[in-house]
Amino acid sequence: MAYETYYWSTSLMSKAIESQPDGEPLRAQIDHKLLCQVATDRDVAGKAEYYHALAQVAREQLARRWVETQHADRANKARRVYYLSMEFLIGRAMNNALSALDLREQAATVFTPPGPSLNEVMECEPDAALGNGGLGRLAACFLDSMATLGLPSWGYGVRYEYGMFAQSIVNGQQVEKPEAWVQDRSPWEFPRAGRHHTVHFGGSAEHSGDWAEWHPADSVEAKAFDHVIPGHGTDRVSTLRLWKAAAPSEIDLGAFNTGDYQRAAEFKNRFENISWVLYPNDSTSAGRELRLRQEYFFVSASMQDILSRHDDEYGSFDNLADKVAIHLNDTHPAIGVAELMRLLVDEHGLKWNAAWEQCRRIFSYTNHTLMPEALETWKVTLMQRVLPRHMLIIYRINHEFLDEVVRLYPGDIDLMRRVSLIDDGNGHEKDKRVRMAHLSIVGSHRINGVSQLHSDLMVQTIFADFARLYPERFHNKTNGVTPRRWLAQSNLGLSALLDERIGKEWRLDLDRLEGLRSVADDAAFGKAFAAAKRDNKLRLADYVAREVGVSLNPDSLFDVQVKRIHEYKRQLLNVLHVITRYNALLNGETAGVAPRSIIFAGKAASSYHMAKQVIRLINDVAAVVNNDPRTRDLLQVAFIPNYGVSVAELIMPAANLSEQISTAGTEASGTGNMKLSLNGALTIGTEDGANIEIRDQVGADNIFIFGNNTAQVAALRQTGYQPSELYQNDPVLKEALDKIDGGFFSPGERSRYHDVFNCLVHYGDHYLLLADYADYVATQARVDALYLTPAEWQRKAILNVAGMGTFSADRTIRDYADDTWKLQTLTNRGTAQ
Ligand code: 26V
């Protein structure tokens, strides 16, 4: 059946309704769920109760699809991919589920006044924020694409009780508060009572040849909680299986039976704390024992689960690598390499060499950062204490690997030291560390970066030795985002316009956006495009007025920087521009200036002082600028609190300008850059990460690229970069920095930003903000000029959307499936490719 008729025909809609047990229309089903599951009725139900009832309707249909998909994969003896990730930043599930089930339009007609609207009902759902940022959201986009492409696929992760903290701003400063995303229950979860595995820790391990006996000191139960991931334009679904830690029942009961409740409670806490809380993305998290336990906990449960499924289906592990692909989302699950070896050799009796051969065919690994402080290592002493058997396995893998290196490069001791899985700590036993990236590379057949630049730098810098040893393993897989959540569901205005012009197929075939090129010059289309953007800006302005108390002019240029707060992302460079613009306006330099609303959002890791200072400075600057009647009409600043998936869904459609201004060579890819451009924002950015590929796709005339590129950054650093000279020699820059340093924005505490100033001017300006400042400010002036010629701006914005086809996560996942996982995708029409 042609895609068009399959996806959008009323026949699918009626099929959905028919497939209900009682064949009732949606309204009646909701009433039924209100009564049976929520124990209320329409007369008294509130928004939250409607939310639960609607979710139950969707849940039932998803459950049916889940059972059918599992049945089909078993019957087809499918090869599957397992995506192991410590983070899945899912966000809300309702809108996506209704869209996948083709129930959204019908649901919108059910929720009418005087009752709550569908949007109000959907807003009752808390975000599932089981991730820090880009890496976790990428994993969520990938699950969506894997399901949509019909890949037999599973995500595996941790069912944290507390995910990402909720951020509020109090007196301009970030305040964190823990957020229990599941509360009592989530309608999207299926607890699998029968699915649990025991995970061991500590004790000792005794070697005898290939095999070893591990006498663990502790064990904990991993209990499975499944989330159904619906595919779009297909009845197939995928599974995200999250593990929750629980005390083993016999220990629990032992203390309980003797009446020692305190001890029973202590036991319970000791075990259950493993899945309590998501670790932050900061350098201080490295080396914490609980984090290592978390990693091993979910990896061991997942590997046992994978092997037991395989055993059920085939009764042998000889064909394991033919049927199983396991992907490591960064090095966090890298202990999986050692765990698979342990399970195959110690528990299932395979010979070491046979197990190792399979292992290398099974694993693949994505690197997500080149930042040296983010590369994961664990102290050997800690690893030995927590996972003694795995330490032995890692030593053996290392021994055999280094033998191979010696054969290839005899006598190159320095090379051996560099590539070893163990950093020898300059001979100090206590400083020895296991390098998780090296374990991942040695144990995998494919290693990739997440943009072309990042993949190139990866093989030229941090993994250069490995690229020489195993050149065939290194590839690039540029990131992508799901067009369902990031356009179809979050930007209804633009979506309707696209449907009208290029048809509806872009949802599953984003290359169709190319069709917009021919209407980029069409004045009527440009007008409609601008009107859709304006509606989205009004919606965001409404939200900002309510949440922040700042009223934004919807006709001003919405200039948006939304992402984690980090020095390398250079929010501070943006602030320098804000202050420079403010100063110019005070000087009466208003000619050619477009009215702007500069919008920030993002969380700082709670222990990251400098990032928190940046948030505070943004808010202090906003307080001064927003309250100055001399500049108010031309400049507004807003920091939107609690950035996450749902807030992003509101911001992305409303942006005119996308700030992607990291120091060249530091942002591995970025994915916000793709979401913003897809929603018709123009980018101002450096030659970093995927910005370069965005330029290739949209054309250099339709993007504002500025600043030093990676080669120039390296050269600057090598020749001795002197930020204080730039400060002294540029009076405009000096004025902005002096205002920060002198307490202009913090009159109650003049020294508040002394450390920020010093960091830039006197302590080396590690991320080269001052080196890129002048070009950034000049480029921002070009942005103004373009915004003041709206027809030209519209044309370029349309060409941005037109060029985004390749940044669909469907393209990325197809690349992984073909090249890395060797998996057959099903086309959107449901036939094998
Ligand atoms: C970075 C840092 C920086 C130094 C302090 C400690 C620390 C810890 C973690 C990280 C980033 C971890 C990996 C990560 O989230 N990478 C992001 O992955 C995205 C998806 O591939 C990509 O778009 C972002 O550019 C990349 O930063």
Image (cartoon, rainbow, N blue to C red):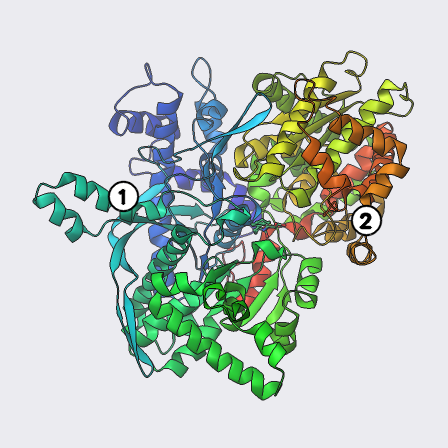
User: Of the numbered discs in the image, which one, if any, rests on residue 133?
Assistant: none
Q: Nearer the viewer, residue 448 or 827?
A: 448
CA neighbours of label 2 inside 10 A, class few (<14), some (14 to 19), many (20+)? some
| Foreground pick, 467 / 401 | 401
- Give the x, y percent position of residue 637: 70, 24
Residue 141 can be seen in this image: no
Q: Is mark 1 within 8 Å of ligand 1?
A: no
Q: Residue at x 29, y 38 (%)?
A: 21
Position in image of residue 253 (x %, y %): 13, 47
479 versus 737 height, above or below:
below
* In the image, residue 346 above or below residue 638: below
- The residue closer to the viewer here, 394 or 538, is 394
**In the picture, residue 715 is in which quadrant?**
bottom right
What residue type is disc 2 on?
Gly
Q: Residue furthest front?
A: 428
Q: Residue furthest left?
A: 258
Q: Estimate the spatial distance between the alpha carbons at disc 2 and disc 1, rounded to whole Å.
A: 56 Å
- Residue pointed to by mark 1: 269
Mark 2 vs mark 1: in front: 1
Residue 525 position, x and y percent, is: 77, 32
Residue at mark 2: 699
Secondary structure beneath label 2: loop
Quadrant for the C terminus, please. bottom right
Q: Residues within 10 Å of mark 1 (few under 14, many from 20)?
A: some
Q: Quadrant of residue 466?
A: bottom right
Q: For the point 70% across and 62% down, which residue is it?
A: 457
